[in-house]
Structure formats: C-alpha cells, structure tokens
Amino acid sequence: MKFVNGKYIPMTPAELAALQPTPYELAMQDWDFHGYELRIPVPIRWFDPTNEELNPSQKRKLEQFIQWWQISEMPIHRKNGSTYGYCHEIMPKHTQFLELLGVTVEARPKAEDFD
C-alpha cells in the first residue's frame, strides 16, 4: 500500500518490483566491507587449538597470517562459521600460503556481472 492524497491505495506490480532488491544488491548483502575487492574465508574451527585439521606448521602460518592481517588494519569479520579477511589485493608471497591452506579467494560481486 502507498499513501496518496490522504488515502492508502494498492501499489502496482511495477512499483512493487522496483522495491525488490536486484540480484546484485542481494549478492552485495553478504559482502560486509563494500570498499574491498577481495575476501578470504577461513573456517572459524581452524582457530580452535584442539582442531587437528591443520598440521602444526599450517597452524603457525595461519596465526602469523592473521597477526599480519590485524597489524595491517585490514577488516576481519566473523559470521556463518567463517572468518572473512577483506583486502584489495593478494601479494604473490601470500598466494603460496593460501594455496597451502586450500583457501579460496573470493572477488566482490560486480554490477555488470548481473546485467
């Protein structure tokens, strides 16, 4: 319903459709820091000291990487069982480490991909 000339009247289908989020807007709802092009999801369970999915070397590298991330003041967000680190680029020296962990780098959705 919309309020027009002192009365509530039904909205047209076109008006209702205009209020719905676009596919791009829906995709961006999951992207917590819109100003960053990339994010790296890491399962929260990896930070549990009793977790045995990672070997000691991988755990040490992960701790170092997270410390570096925090020192660099890049945003980290935790939700849905993952810790997401947001950044603008992945340095070549970190690519090998991310591959070692089997972590996937995600790119921020682009509006043109939804046209």
Image (cartoon, helix red, strand yellow):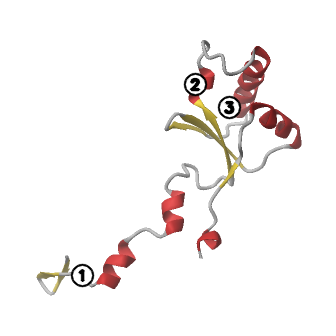
Cα–Cα gap, marks 2 and 3: 19 Å
Residue corresponding to mark 1: 11
Left or right: residue 98 compared with residue 112: right
Say which label, 2 or 3, has the lower sequence index: 2
SS category of the residue bearing label 2: helix
Q: Residue furthest front?
A: 53
Quarter the C terminus occupies:
bottom right
SS category of the residue bearing label 1: loop
Residue visible at 68% across and 31% down?
Answer: 70
Q: Say above or below: 41 vs 48.
A: below
Residue corresponding to mark 2: 45
Left or right: residue 20 compared with residue 13: right
Say which label, 3 or 1, has the lower sequence index: 1
Please, what is the three-letter code of the amino acid marked with disc 1?
A: Met
Task: Return the mark for residue 69.
Answer: none
Q: Where is residue 58 shown, x and y percent of the image?
A: 76, 22
Between 63 and 7, the one nearer to me in the picture: 63
Residue visible at 71% across and 38% down?
Answer: 103
Mark 2 surroundings: few (<14), some (14-19) or many (≥20) residues within 10 A: some
Left or right: residue 112 compared with residue 58: left
Please, what is the three-letter code of the amino acid marked with disc 3?
A: Gln
Quarter the N terminus occupies:
bottom left
Residue visible at 80% across and 32% down?
Answer: 100
- Foreground mark, 2 or 3, reads 2
Report the label total.
Answer: 3
Residue visible at 71% across and 21% down?
Answer: 54
Residue corresponding to mark 3: 70
